Amino acid sequence: MPPTPESARRRRRPTKQGTVLTHDLIVATALRMLAEHGAAGLSARRLGLALGADPSAVYRYFAGMDDLVLAIGDELIHRALDGWEPTGDWCEDLRSLGTRIHRAYLAHPQAAQLTANRVSGRSHEIAADETILGILHTAGFRGAAAARVYHAFIDQTLAFAALDAASLALPDQAREADEQQWRATYARLPAATHPHIAAAAPLLVARMNDSAYPAALDLLLAGAAAELEA
């Protein structure tokens, strides 16, 4: 069954706050609620209160709360692609797309934890997939090679988004305690018992509290380029 058009779903009268409900307004409000209260704070009842509408109004736009979660994930992809323009250099284009997707998810860490492992099948996700596969095709990847690089690229991007978002979503005290472990524990291990950690400790202290995604992306693209040349 095709989705109900926006015009048919739209609330005819303004809410108590004087706004007219739309798909985009509900998604934006849900993103704000996730940022303020986390996943546990997102419910139709609370969403209705935030919108100044009856909670049942949400179901004129979404089949259920899981459908709303998928729409949130699609909106994050939309924000990542908004304004992006290709350069014609396939490596640079994939690097910039991956970086933008990763950054869009980290801007909403609570939402990222809910959506990074989901497949929405919605318009912005489909547009992103078509764009990435088009870049690979233009570069010269075909068939199984294109599918393999696409799979590694998108899963790596979303996996790092989920990992880094989970860290950002921690309470400040817990996150700071984790970050201090590299200086308080690893940097103090003696070379006599842990020679490899002791040798790498200064480098690890400098790197481990930052995301490894840029380095991992460079490694993936370098491997893909080498495969293409071979």
Image: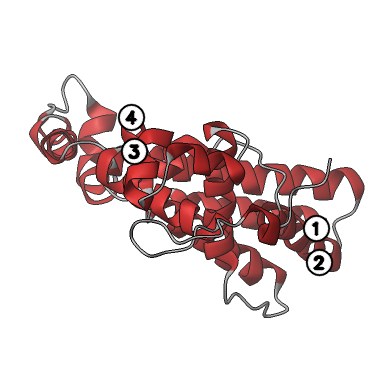
Q: Pick whichever of labels 3 and 2 is earlier in the sequence.
A: 3
Residue 171 found in image quarter = top left
Q: Secondary structure at mark 1?
A: helix
Look at label 1 and name its amino acid.
Answer: Leu
Q: Pick whichever of labels 1 and 3 is earlier in the sequence.
A: 3
Q: Residues within 10 Å of mark 3 (few under 14, many from 20)?
A: some
Residue ID for mark 2? 139
Residue ID for mark 4? 40
Using the image as rendered, state which of residue 211 and residue 193 is in the foreground: 211
Q: Secondary structure at mark 4?
A: helix
Q: Give the alpha-carbon distance from disc 1 to disc 3, as whole Å.
A: 51 Å
Q: Residues within 10 Å of mark 1 (few under 14, many from 20)?
A: few
Q: Residue at x 85, y 62 (%)?
A: 137
Using the image as rendered, state which of residue 58 and residue 18 is in the foreground: 18
Which label sits in the foreground, 3 or 4? 3
Residue ID for mark 3? 46
Look at label 2 and name its amino acid.
Answer: Ala
Residue ID for mark 1? 228
Q: Pick whichever of labels 1 and 2 is earlier in the sequence.
A: 2
Residue 134: where, in percent of width, then height?
81, 63
Look at label 3 and name its amino acid.
Answer: Arg
Which label sits in the foreground, 1 or 2? 2
Q: Is residue 161 above or below residue 20?
A: above
Q: Is residue 167 above or below residue 123?
A: above
Residue 104: where, in percent of width, then height?
46, 58
Residue 41: where, in percent of width, then height?
31, 34
Q: Give the alpha-carbon distance from disc 3 to disc 2, as whole Å.
A: 48 Å
